[in-house]
Amino acid sequence: MRLIITTPTEIAVNIDNVHHVRAEDSTGSFGVLPGHADFLTALTISVLNWRDDAGSEHCAAVRGGVLRVRGGKSVQVATREAVVGNDLQHLREVVLKQMARNAESEQAARLGAFGLQEAAVQKIYRYLRPSERPASLLGHKS
């Protein structure tokens, strides 16, 4: 099989002769062997493992993403971030924790930006609705 792991800025892995891929989605971990049926799933922040035809194990930490199996010959992963390494313990302990922290801080920033956008829309709405405009904006003297 061919394994391709891409991020928005790079192709992290692009190799042939992969014999087995192990990944993780919200239902748990699963494996993909050559000849696997077409498949599409959303990955969690996890470590993806694969074994080549020589039996060597390789791994990459992925920050969620989408995994697609095509024709039993190709496994494609699109993720926001990927760190390829051979130290599985390091990937699990350090990299996955950092990815989770990054995801949480980005979520907090998105929520903050959404709150600002909502406040701006409410102010515009009040300004455009004459019945809700403050008297000072209507030219009335109190």
Image (cartoon, rainbow, N blue to C red):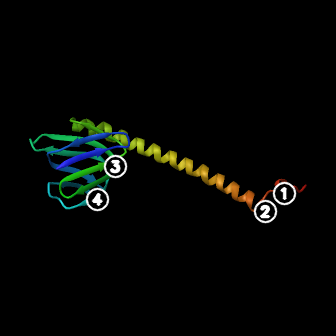
If you read the primary sequence from the N terminus, does the residue marked by circle 2 or circle 1 appear first? 2
Q: In the image, is 106 to the left or to the right of 85?
A: right
Q: Mark 1 points at which residue?
A: 138
Crowding at label 1, few (<14), some or many (≥20) Cα neighbours within 10 Å?
few
> Mark 4 belongs to which amino acid?
Leu
Q: Relative to residue 114, is residue 33 drawn left or right?
A: left
Would you name the residue on which mark 3 appears?
A: 64
* Earlier residue among tags 4 and 2: 4
Structural distance between the alpha carbons of marks 4 and 2: 51 Å
- Residue contact at pointers 2 and 1, CB within 8 angstroms: yes
Q: Assess whether mark 2 and mark 4 are in contact (beta carbons under 8 angstroms).
A: no
Task: Name the kind of residue labelled 2 in the image.
Answer: Pro
Q: How far apart are labels 2 and 1 at the CA level?
A: 8 Å
Check disc 4 and report its element: helix, strand or loop. Answer: strand
Q: Which mark is residue 40?
A: 4
**Which element is circle 3 on?**
strand
Q: Where is residue 122 in the image (x, y as percent from the top left)?
A: 67, 57
User: Which residue is outermost to the right?
Assistant: 141
- Give the quarter of the image for residue 123: bottom right
Residue at which label 2 appears: 130
Earlier sequence position, callout 1 versus callout 4:
4
